[in-house]
Image (spheres, helix red, strand yellow):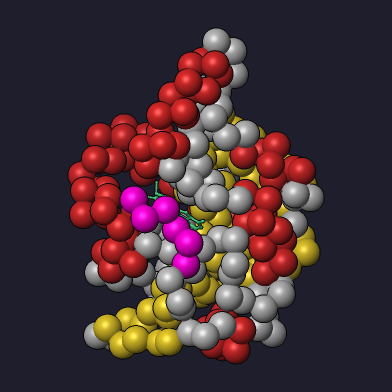
Amino acid sequence: MQNDPDGAARRRTDAETNEAGSKRVTTRRPPSAPPIYDALAPHYERALRPLELLILARLRAATLRALSGKGAGGDSDDGGGGGGGRLLEIGAGTGLNFPHYPPGARGAATEPSREMLRLAQTKPRPAGVRLVQTNAEALPFADDTFDAAFATLVFCSVASPPKAFAELRRVVRAGGRVALLEHVRPPGLLGPVFDLISRFTVRLCEDHFNRRTADEARRAGLRIISVEPHVLGIIQLIVCEV
Ligand SMILES: C[S@@+](CC[C@H](N)C(=O)[O-])C[C@H]1O[C@@H](n2cnc3c(N)ncnc32)[C@H](O)[C@@H]1O
């Protein structure tokens, strides 16, 4: 890759780099993340634990595998961030995906919430993966910096999915993969139920329970490779190509 994520971040933003032990975190001016995530951060993993044990941990692993073509979505052998490719995570939260990164992964795990990021910083992750504080709608990286990108449970909270997808298309090289594990508006009778739930969750915690994330990705110009439904279609593993 010709672009260095950290170098690009420094060039393109008013970034500061902090030392925290041996791990560096690049921060920018406060990004526009839902402030609720700072408050949720200390309780996040405990609240998610039952789902994590039941299904999420398995789906997180499948999401990372999908980037290298070994999971849902096809036959590519590049871009997972392990075999030399640069990997980008959007909305990394407390770092629950770090154990699933390929061992030699290089790139950036981004997250707008300072408190989520603070917890992520305590988790082991591949040495070549930097933490960067930013939101998805304004990524501080040069064009074509990454070979692949992914997000888990993020697009329900993103304020502007079109802007976030436009940014993903810009920073991931042409032909690179984007894998999204998202809770979405399910099909059938559950759809209207989720429309109703969403009215409350948006007000309560800025979480959209009825997003149609695959449609948003397609509208933004990503090519959908596969959409794998889980849990009655409430969760989807969406694999796209830039
Ligand atoms: C439900 S948590 C998921 C965290 C983590 N990806 C996981 O799977 O555990 C949603 C995350 O999205 C982040 N987020 C919210 N708005 C965002 C935005 N506009 N851009 C990027 N991340 C965002 C939040 O700060 C939070 O960490």
Q: Position of residue 6 (x, y in %)?
A: 53, 84
Q: Residue furthest top?
A: 189
- Residue 185: quarter of image: top right
Q: Residue furthest front?
A: 203
State left or right for residue 178 relative to residue 197.
Answer: right
First to last magenta residue range:
31-36
Residue 207 visible? The answer is yes
Question: Where the C terminus falls, by quadrant?
Answer: bottom right
Residue in the picture at 24% in, 40% down:
47
Q: Looking at this view, is 77 or 101 the one in front? A: 101
- Residue 11: quarter of image: bottom right
Secondary structure mostly seen in the magenta stretch:
loop
Question: Where the N terminus falls, by quadrant?
Answer: bottom right
Q: Is residue 146 magenta?
A: no
Q: Is 77 drawn above or below residue 143 in the view shown? A: above
Residue in the picture at 46% in, 78% down:
28
Q: Looking at this view, is 29 or 54 the one in front? A: 29
- Residue 96: quarter of image: bottom left
Q: Is 45 drawn above or below residue 183 in the view shown? A: below
Q: Position of residue 111 (x, y in %)?
A: 43, 63
Residue in the picture at 68% in, 50% down:
162
State left or right for residue 130 relative to residue 51.
Answer: right
Q: Looking at this view, is 87 or 80 the one in front? A: 87
Residue 177 visible? The answer is no
Residue in the picture at 64% in, 70% down:
146
Q: Position of residue 52 (x, y in %)?
A: 31, 40
Q: Is residue 34 magenta?
A: yes
